[in-house]
Protein backbone atom coordinates (compact mmCIF):
# COMPACT_ATOMS: atom_id res chain seq x y z
CA UNK A 1 0.00 0.00 0.00
CA UNK A 2 1.19 3.47 -0.78
CA UNK A 3 2.02 5.61 2.24
CA UNK A 4 0.59 8.74 0.60
CA UNK A 5 -2.95 7.33 0.46
CA UNK A 6 -5.47 9.34 2.47
CA UNK A 7 -7.43 6.90 4.65
CA UNK A 8 -9.54 9.58 6.30
CA UNK A 9 -11.73 10.18 3.25
CA UNK A 10 -12.90 6.62 2.67
CA UNK A 11 -14.68 5.87 5.94
CA UNK A 12 -16.83 8.96 6.28
CA UNK A 13 -20.57 8.58 6.62
CA UNK A 14 -21.09 10.30 3.26
CA UNK A 15 -18.85 7.83 1.45
CA UNK A 16 -20.66 4.92 3.11
CA UNK A 17 -24.04 6.35 2.09
CA UNK A 18 -22.80 6.88 -1.46
CA UNK A 19 -21.76 3.22 -1.62
CA UNK A 20 -25.06 2.10 -0.09
CA UNK A 21 -27.25 4.07 -2.51
CA UNK A 22 -25.53 2.96 -5.71
CA UNK A 23 -26.98 1.02 -8.65
CA UNK A 24 -25.91 -2.40 -7.37
CA UNK A 25 -27.68 -1.96 -4.05
CA UNK A 26 -30.77 -0.15 -5.36
CA UNK A 27 -33.08 -3.19 -5.31
CA UNK A 28 -32.08 -3.95 -1.71
CA UNK A 29 -32.54 -0.32 -0.70
CA UNK A 30 -35.99 -0.18 -2.31
CA UNK A 31 -37.03 -3.40 -0.55
CA UNK A 32 -35.72 -2.05 2.74
CA UNK A 33 -37.67 1.22 2.39
CA UNK A 34 -40.87 -0.59 1.35
CA UNK A 35 -40.66 -2.88 4.38
CA UNK A 36 -39.93 0.08 6.66
CA UNK A 37 -42.97 1.99 5.38
CA UNK A 38 -45.17 -1.10 5.80
CA UNK A 39 -44.02 -1.59 9.40
CA UNK A 40 -44.40 2.12 10.22
CA UNK A 41 -47.95 2.17 8.84
CA UNK A 42 -48.70 -1.06 10.71
CA UNK A 43 -47.45 0.29 14.00
CA UNK A 44 -49.37 3.56 13.60
CA UNK A 45 -52.55 1.65 12.70
CA UNK A 46 -52.18 -0.71 15.67
CA UNK A 47 -51.42 2.20 18.01
CA UNK A 48 -54.63 3.95 16.97
CA UNK A 49 -56.69 0.76 17.13
CA UNK A 50 -55.29 0.00 20.60
CA UNK A 51 -56.80 3.15 22.06
CA UNK A 52 -60.11 2.59 20.28
CA UNK A 53 -60.49 -1.07 21.31
CA UNK A 54 -63.24 -1.85 23.78
CA UNK A 55 -62.24 -5.36 24.82
CA UNK A 56 -59.06 -6.36 26.61
CA UNK A 57 -58.20 -9.19 24.18
CA UNK A 58 -58.18 -6.75 21.25
CA UNK A 59 -56.04 -4.31 23.23
CA UNK A 60 -53.53 -7.07 23.89
CA UNK A 61 -53.58 -8.11 20.22
CA UNK A 62 -53.00 -4.57 18.95
CA UNK A 63 -50.29 -3.95 21.55
CA UNK A 64 -48.47 -7.15 20.54
CA UNK A 65 -48.67 -6.28 16.83
CA UNK A 66 -47.50 -2.73 17.60
CA UNK A 67 -44.46 -4.05 19.48
CA UNK A 68 -43.64 -6.53 16.68
CA UNK A 69 -43.86 -3.79 14.03
CA UNK A 70 -41.73 -1.42 16.09
CA UNK A 71 -39.08 -4.09 16.69
CA UNK A 72 -39.09 -4.94 12.99
CA UNK A 73 -38.34 -1.30 12.17
CA UNK A 74 -35.37 -1.47 14.53
CA UNK A 75 -34.13 -4.70 12.94
CA UNK A 76 -34.37 -3.13 9.49
CA UNK A 77 -32.26 -0.22 10.69
CA UNK A 78 -29.64 -2.59 12.08
CA UNK A 79 -29.61 -4.49 8.78
CA UNK A 80 -29.12 -1.24 6.87
CA UNK A 81 -26.25 -0.25 9.16
CA UNK A 82 -24.58 -3.64 8.65
CA UNK A 83 -24.88 -3.19 4.90
CA UNK A 84 -23.32 0.29 5.26
CA UNK A 85 -20.37 -1.15 7.17
CA UNK A 86 -19.84 -4.04 4.74
CA UNK A 87 -17.60 -2.17 2.32
CA UNK A 88 -15.34 -0.74 4.99
CA UNK A 89 -14.92 -4.20 6.52
CA UNK A 90 -13.97 -5.58 3.09
CA UNK A 91 -11.35 -2.83 2.73
CA UNK A 92 -9.89 -3.58 6.14
CA UNK A 93 -9.68 -7.30 5.34
CA UNK A 94 -7.91 -6.49 2.07
CA UNK A 95 -5.42 -4.26 3.93
CA UNK A 96 -4.73 -7.07 6.40
CA UNK A 97 -4.18 -9.51 3.53
CA UNK A 98 -1.69 -7.12 1.94
CA UNK A 99 0.13 -6.61 5.23
CA UNK A 100 0.35 -10.38 5.75
CA UNK A 101 1.70 -10.82 2.23
CA UNK A 102 4.33 -8.11 2.86
CA UNK A 103 5.28 -9.73 6.16
CA UNK A 104 5.53 -13.12 4.49
CA UNK A 105 7.89 -11.68 1.84
CA UNK A 106 10.11 -10.07 4.48
CA UNK A 107 10.31 -13.33 6.46
CA UNK A 108 11.20 -15.31 3.31
CA UNK A 109 13.95 -12.83 2.41
CA UNK A 110 15.63 -13.11 5.84
Image (cartoon, grey):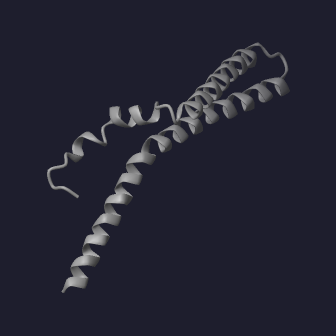
Task: Farthest residue to the top: give it.
Answer: 52
Quarter of the image where one finds residue 19: top left
Query: Residue 78 location, x and y as percent?
Result: 52, 40
Query: Residue 70 location, x and y as percent?
Result: 62, 30
Query: Residue 17 location, x and y as percent?
Result: 40, 32
Out of 53 and 70, give the one closest to the viewer.
70
Quarter of the image where one finds residue 53: top right
> Residue at the location (25% across, 40% down)?
9
Relative horizontal placement of residue 7, taking residue 97 as reference (left or right) = left
Where 28 sits versus 4, above or below? above
Relative horizontal placement of residue 88, taking residue 37 as reference (left or right) = left
Task: Farthest residue to the left: give it.
Answer: 4
Which quarter of the rendering shows the C terminus?
bottom left
Out of 83 and 90, give the one closest to the viewer.
90
Relative horizontal placement of residue 74, taking residue 99 as reference (left or right) = right
> Residue at the location (21% across, 78% down)?
106
Amino acid sequence: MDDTYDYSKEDTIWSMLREFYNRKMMSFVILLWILAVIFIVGSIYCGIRFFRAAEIKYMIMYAAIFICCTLSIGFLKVLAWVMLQRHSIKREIKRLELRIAELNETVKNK
